[in-house]
Structure formats: structure tokens, C-alpha cells
Amino acid sequence: MAAGKRLHAKEDGRIFNVPDSVDYPFLILLLLVLTVGLTMLYSASSAQSLYNTGYKTSTYFLKRQAVCALLGLGAMWLLSRVPSDFWNKAAWPLYFLSIGLLLLVLLFGQTVNGAKRWINIGGLQFQPSEIAKFTMILLFAKLTRGYGEDSKTFRYGVLGFGGALMGILVPLALERHLSAIMLMGMVAVVMMFVAGTPGKWLLMGAGIAVAFMVVYVSVLGYAGDRITAWFHPENDPGDTGYQILQALYAIGSGGLFGLGFGMSRQKYMYLPFQYNDYIFAVVCEELGLVGALAIMALFGLMIYRGYQIALHANDRFSTVLAAGLISQIGVQTFLNIGVVTNLLPSTGVALPFFSYGGTALAVNLAEMGIILSISRYRNRAARQEDFL
């Protein structure tokens, strides 16, 4: 038996588990990703920080992100001690709360960078969509536990999950939050697959989603411009293709080993959102192909370890919840790197733990705390419900 594993036997011979230590490999990988992310954020944002503050400080964005990181780490520590049963009971109330917050954005939201996705409550400005992502995953895990084998039927595996998903996606569509719709849709497919929804219906749903996206993009002119720029950025280098070209210049100039930490040229007001959605281009420019691959490998190891925790969770709900939370990180990472390298059209999806954004960072760290909590109660010898 592994050291530190605490199992107790009842009189009838059944084995049950008690809280143990968190999964340290996952925790170490997470802290490494966060540390590298904050370091690269400082480098990518230093020029913009100097410009915004009248050349007084190069750490304006880093300080704000560091505060959110500390808050997120505190939330992660607290949530790593909350049993998953709490989240099972809180799923429906939090789901309806997130829908209410999304609707409040439509009525009283604040516009930032041309998008009305923020809301201010008690002096705290945040994006309700970040909370909605979590509550969708939470509700899907609860539904999976409740549906059981019925997840393989059309009524529950498609209509049940689909109805819950639409409760979140409709307000997001009204906000024109295309990136959140894409992300949540992809995570939902992963969770439905884990729940047992047959592949034929998932493929059918994917086809409907593609058709919806085509119609949605055709209605939103700016989104259509993104598709055009994706195919031919060189046709409009001064406008719609500018950001893509500048990102590719940064990636190309990095070469094999990069220009060196802090030596990016594109971050000096050439590459827009160099400390946000396009921070990975600065990573490639300064650390080169080798550094970029190392960071991708670090993400890959953390995500793999997260799935290992999910597979060894102690019950059906915890398995699906952990799988959904780590899938969100994986999908975001894939979409962001795909956009920055121009393999995918621009989506506005940030790179987890790297991109500037206090709400997203704090929420992501808190979610990782839930995965750590699930790892506390893992016990391979304990009896787990069948879920596939």
C-alpha cells in the first residue's frame, strides 16, 4: 500500500477512505505553470505598463495579476478541503445564480474593449461568464450522477444535458460572447462522452453546433472579419490581419532558442493584447521553439495528471467533475495556442495561468482546488460506481 494512504476497514469487511494528502505531483505542476505564467506576463506586459503609467513602473499589470493569484491560491487552499458532496448539493443553486448574473450583464453590464461582458458588484468588476463555465461543469457532473445508465438514452444523454447547456449559452449568445460559447460547447461534449452519451449523437450535435456557428458568425460582422483575416491576413495587414501577422512575426523571430527573456521586440506596442490573448507569441519570441514546447509539455503533464485524478476519484460525481474542470484548461490551452499560431481563427480565448485577467486566474485556481480536494479522497481500493 502506498505510503500516506489511509484506509479503514469496517466490521463487515468493506473499505472506506478518509481524507488524505492532496496529489502533490498535480500541485507542483500547477504551481510551476503559475510561476512561469506570472514571469512571462511580467515580460510581455512591461512595455505596455510603462506606457500606461507614464514610464513610472513596468510592473502595473504584474502587481494586479499577482493580487488575483494570491486570492486564487487562497481559494484553492480552502476548496481543497471541501468534500465534493458539497458541490453536488450546490449545483442547481449556483447554476441559476450564474444565469441571473449573465442576464444582469445584458441590463447593467460594463463595456470593456468594445465588449459588454463585465459587471460591477460592490466595487468588484468581474465576468459572470467565468462563473458560468464552472457552474455548467458542476451541473453536468450532478446530472451524470443522477442519470446513471440513462445517460445513454436520447432523452437524458442529449435532451437532458443539452437543455442544461442552453440555459447558459442563450444569455452568452445575447452577449455575443463567441469565445465562451465555443469553449463551453467543447467542454460539454467531453463531459457528455464521459457520462456515456453515444458517439453518434455527439457527432450529430457537433454538426448542429457547426451550423449554428456559421449562422452566428454571418450575423456578427466582426466575427466574419476574423474568419477572412484567418485565411488571408496579408490582404489587410493594416487592419483585420494586423494582429495575426504581428503574432507570426514574433513567433518566427524567436527561432529555435528565442531572443532571450525580456528581449521581445513585438511587445513594444506592435502586437496588440501581447499580455493577454497573444501572450504565447511573446513566449515563442523570447524562449523560442524549445521554450514554447517545454511550456506546452508542462501544460500537458498537468492536464494528464488531472485526468489521472479524475479516473481514480472515489465516486461518479467526482470523476466527471474533475474531468470537466481539467478539460476546460485543456480546451482553453488548445484554442489559445491554435489561434496565436494561426491554426484557428481568432476566438478571444485566453491562455490559462498566463494571460492577464484577474477573474479568470482566480476562478481557475479555485477550480484546481476542487480537483485537489477530489484527489484527497481518491482510493483505488474503494468501490466506485460504474460510469461508462
Image: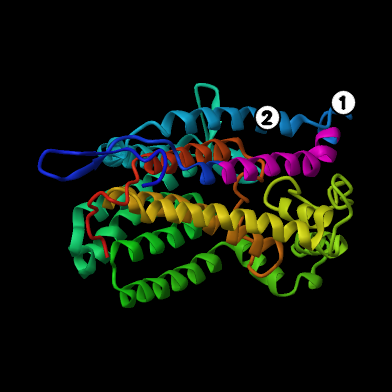
Q: How crowded is the residue under tag 2: few (<14 C-alpha within 10 Å), some, or many (20+)?
A: few
Residue 94 location, x and y as percent? 33, 38
From the viewer's side, name the closer residue of 278 and 79. Answer: 79
Residue 288 location, x and y as percent? 81, 59
Residue 128 location, x and y as percent? 47, 39
Q: Residue at x 86, y 44 (%)?
A: 262
Mark toward the start of the polypeptide (2 vs 1): 1
Residue that carries the numbered disc 2 in the rendered image? 64
Q: What is the span of residues highlighted in magenta in the rendered image?
A: 28-50
Residue that carries the numbered disc 1 in the rendered image? 56
| Dot 2 and dot 1 residues touching (CB under 8 Å) | no
Identity, as a three-letter code, of the amino acid under mark 1: Lys
* Marks 2/1: CA–CA distance: 16 Å
Question: Is residue 89 positioned above or below 141 on the image?
Answer: above
Q: Residue at x 19, y 66 (%)?
A: 155
Q: How crowded is the residue under tag 1: few (<14 C-alpha within 10 Å), some, or many (20+)?
A: few
Residue 356 location, x and y as percent? 67, 41
Q: Main secondary structure of the magenta part?
A: helix
Asked whether residue 207 appears in the rendered view, the answer is yes
In the rendered structure, does residue 256 fall within the stretch colored magenta?
A: no
Q: Secondary structure at mark 1?
A: loop
Residue 41 sits in quarter: top right
Question: Is residue 156 positioned above or below 63 on the image?
Answer: below
Q: Residue furthest top?
A: 122
Q: Residue at x 10, y 43 (%)?
A: 12
Q: Residue furthest left?
A: 12
From the viewer's side, name the closer residue of 306 and 356. Answer: 306
From the viewer's side, name the closer residue of 49 and 305. Answer: 305
Q: Secondary structure at mark 2?
A: helix
Identity, as a three-letter code, of the amino acid under mark 2: Arg
Residue 323 sits in quarter: bottom left
